[in-house]
Image (cartoon, rainbow, N blue to C red):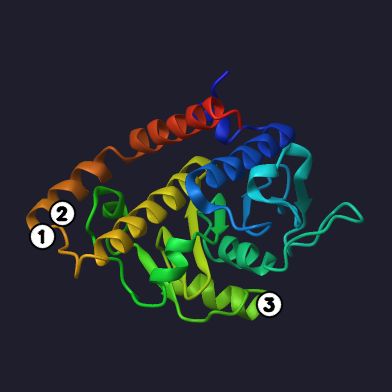
Amino acid sequence: MTATRAEAAPASAQALRESVARSCRILAHQGHDHLCFGHVSVRDPAGSGLLVKVAGLGLEEVRADDVAATDSAGAAIEPGVQLHDEMPLHTEIYRARPDVGAIVHTHPSTVAILSLFEQSLLITSQDAVPFRNRLAFYPSSDLVTTVEQGRELAATLGGGRAAVLRAHGLVAVGADLAEATVNAVLLERAMRTNLAASALGRPEPIGAADLDALERRFEHDRDRRIERLWDYLVRTLERAGG
């Protein structure tokens, strides 16, 4: 059965683990795979910690048993669980942003490539419109492995929906797994369009009047758009057998 957006943020820890795993597999199917790297997390409604993908698996491999519980500092609760080194990326964004319920960090090639040339996103497609004045650029190419680096990234993100990390990848946030996942998918698509267009020259951004109209339309209807996009991404994954 297809999971709705409401099921992307369920009450039980087990159902939430299923949704984190589903988000990981969606991201892999949408071109965010990078060997065994990349991670997705969500706040644990049962406590002050997180539920997060474990280390060592590709996004496409993740199932509910591969999602671990952590404390508020990002340390695994169960012994022997191996977590990604970049847990401060998650803990410090959550600490700075009470409105954020889920975080995606992936390394799409398109984003890593464009991050070497652009420090702002040219709005050349409808996929890019939700990030108008809501996308940050983190200039360090190092991994975000310390609390200090996590705080720097959180400060750079500010109140935005996503950040591009130089020569690294992206971070996308949302109120729930559906929104964070959709934000990550749309940002990668927007940057893929820019990368393809740049092969022909300097892309021409969408004009201000049209951009204003699109932004008003998309923001007015944002919750319904997120729900529809999440549901589509789930159906697409299911059709692919993922």
The tag on residue 55 is: none
Q: Report the quarter where the C terminus lies.
A: top right
Furthest-top residue in this view: 1
Sequence-wise, which precedes: disc 2 or disc 3?
3
Tag 1 residue: 208
The tag on residue 146 is: 3
Which is nearer the eye, 27 or 44?
A: 27
Residue at image coords 46%, 81%: 139
Tag 2 residue: 211
Q: What residue type is labelled 1?
A: Ala
Label 1, label 3: how far apart the Cα atoms are:
40 Å
Sequence-wise, which precedes: disc 1 or disc 3?
3
Furthest-right residue in this view: 79
As displayed, is residue 173 above or below residue 6?
below
Q: Quadrant of residue 24?
A: top right
Q: Which amino acid does label 3 sit on?
A: Thr
| Cβ atoms at labels 1 and 2 below 8 Å apart | yes
In this picture, residue 202 sits left or right of residue 174: left
Can residue 45 be seen here? The reply is no
The image shows residue 118 at horizontal and vertical percentages of 33, 75
As displayed, is residue 48 above or below residue 109?
above
